[in-house]
Image: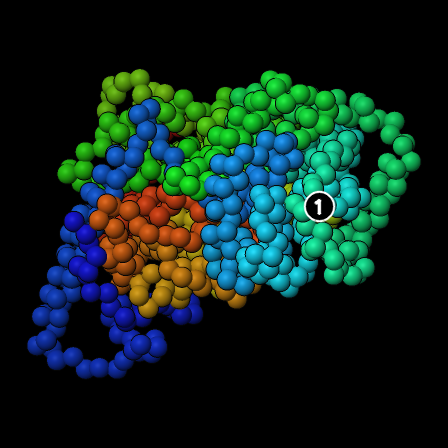
Amino acid sequence: MTLSGRIETTSVRSSDSGSHRFNRAQRYDSVGNPINQTVPQSDLPGRQAHADNRTKVTESLADLALQQTSRWFIKNQNADGHWRGPLEGDTILESEYLLICGWAGCLDQNTMFGCSKRILAEQLPEGGWAIYPGGDADPSASVKAYLALKMCGCDANSEPMKRARTAIAKAGGPWAVNSFTRFYLALLGQISYSDCPAVPPEMILLPDWFPISLHRVSAWSRTMIVPLSLIWSFKPVRTLPRDRGIQELFADCTYEMRNRSVGGNDVWSRFFRLVDSVIKFVDCLGFRPLRRRAIMACRQWMLERFQGSDGLGAIFPPIVWSIVALRAMGCSENSAEVSECWKQLEGLLERPDDQTIRVEPCRSPVWDTAIALRGLAEIDSPSVKVSSNMSSAVDWLLAREVRFAGDWSRRVQAAPSGWCFEYANQYYPDVDDTAMVLIAFSSWMRRQNLLRQDDVGWRLSYVKKATRRGIEWLTAMQNSDGGWGAFDRNNNHELLCKVPFADHNAMIDPSSPDLAGRVLEAFGSLGHGVGEPVVDRAIEYLRATQDSDGSWFGRWGVNYIYGTWQAIEGLRAVGISRDDPLVERGISWLYSKQQPNGAWGESPASYADPSLKGVGEPTASQTAWAVAGLVAAGEGSSLSARRGVQWLLTTQRPDGDWDEAAFTGTGFPKVFYLRYHYYRISFPLIAIARWRASLGIDSNRQNPGQVGTRKESSEIDEEVFA
């Protein structure tokens, strides 16, 4: 059964403006102005009854939507209990896969056809390629796509290729590409390695206290720098036939275009460009007294991190660079190390249909499973039978706890714990996944009412122990400013963002409001709150990082809708009042961004242009985030929340899913974005379930999504959470 068309979505604007609270009794015209009207007293009972009936209809349809969505999750759960949805990036992944296969000499017809089909399907009408749907042509994505298509035999005079050349020239030409793209061009003989930033392997020998040492950069940059430094040292090249190269793109480039400065024009950026030139000059002279030692250290560092991982860093770029680095050092194509890298790389290939190949940046099973478990646990309906499904998901997550001291332990003294994003990545558990798993465990315990039972078996015992370890690990990972980064503590040395290689915009891993909000939500869901030092420091961090308009930045989701939702969620979970100005301003901002149809949406363009905060095509995931934020703030009974839920109900598909083509996940702001295929269904499930449960609850007190949690947790605080 479909819900489409069952609800009449009002066009009345329900947004707040400024700092005042939304007046639910006031009506507004189509442009948001209050309508002065006199209602006869005799009409009031009838109008109230009509409003009550509309709410009841929405509630009934919400129940049906929850049943449909829960059935969808039951149907799509893997036999061992976990969920994993496709994780989609832009075409740089398919392009880079073709380029590495071409460099390795292992391109085959099926690979060329499948990847090329996706690349051509994503080409913009004007000829270039964007890094997210609706974005402008990106020079790096466009140049890599053009080279990949040429390698696959596309005619340079064909209409798509002519349009591509025009778009690339308009975007700044081939010299406007980023550092990663330059290394691909150098690998294939299209430019010289002297045109790439210097990445000397000797960096691995620098002590941790040194300002530009390896462990001062972010975890993901670390896993790319080490193999890239080996590539820069050996400078391997596979020269393409002239008709498969892209020299035509360079034909009209001026001297100024080729020698354009990489990075900013501030003092430190100019200083590091000078250092880059000196390193290259010294390298050309052959003065490399520590090179052999550095190469062996880099090799050992890489091979150690192959263990217990889905490839180096368990993400696409380091796996690719590992193949090149190992081959450059003399490893054969059939060696165990290289074969393992190819195996992990090929595991990232998705085939959405019989002809298309889409390359994933990594796998997301832990993240997807935790969110799905949390959503199913939020359903408070006897008609939804998911207990066994949740139990198997809990068991799967328990088995994925990382009890290994990875890179994070160089700066943190704590018992190893945490969860990673992928199937296996033991060196890099992360704060976000760990917090989400803890929230899921807490939701599961509440759903099963396990906290009030005397004998609940081995599963609860294991969950209690894992939860305690996770809380202790998160506490130890808190940064000095009160927030959290993703993988390391106090990884915030901004000077590193000035080096020429830092143009991927993620050289460091500082605190972000969305992570602080999620960790606070995890703490609050497990009985911790205001008055505890770790919580109080995080609250002050969120006070310091709230923008003047009431919103918060979202580092790992697009963008201010994501950050604001998560900040409100965390603040309310640990006991901050709905009337606190911090929460009040966040609520007002969410109201102000609701669209006339009741939904919310935001484009990744807001990362480059903050004036576009909360502006974009409506999406199911972002609408769910906003609704969840309102519910967490005690505004579940507001007209805005109900209209948001109504939009979700009217747009749900008959199978319980939603349509969403937008990229609402963030890899590197301004550089790389993601489409989590489960976001469009997991987060609406959570939002609708929590909205349904919030009705009738005092909105000025406890966070509706956490009702009973603080009380229940406090009763057994010493036993479970210490």
Res. 3 in view: yes
On screen, residue 229 versus residue 19, left or right, reads right
Q: Give the colour scheme of this rendering.
A: rainbow
Image spot of residue 673 (x, y percent): 51, 49
**Residue closer to the observer: 703 or 648:** 648
On screen, residue 598 versus residue 672, left or right, reads left
User: In the image, what residue occupies the spot 28% across and 30% down?
Assistant: 390
**Residue closer to the observer: 177 or 11:** 177
On screen, residue 610 versus residue 389, left or right, reads right
User: In the image, what residue occupies the spot 25% across and 34% down?
Assistant: 74
- The answer to whether residue 230 is above or below residue 143 is above
Res. 539 in view: no
- Helix, strand or loop for disc 1: helix
Image spot of residue 329 (x, y percent): 73, 24
Residue ID for mark 1: 242
Image spot of residue 113 (x, y percent): 49, 41
Q: How many residues crowd mark 1 within 10 Å: few (<14), some (14–19), many (20+)?
A: few
Name the amino acid, label 1.
Arg
User: In the image, what residue occupies the spot 12% across and 80% down?
Assistant: 40
Q: Quadrant of residue 630?
A: bottom left
- The answer to whether residue 551 is above or below residue 230 is below
Q: Quadrant of residue 376?
A: top left
User: In the image, what residue occupies the spot 76% across and 25% down?
Assistant: 295
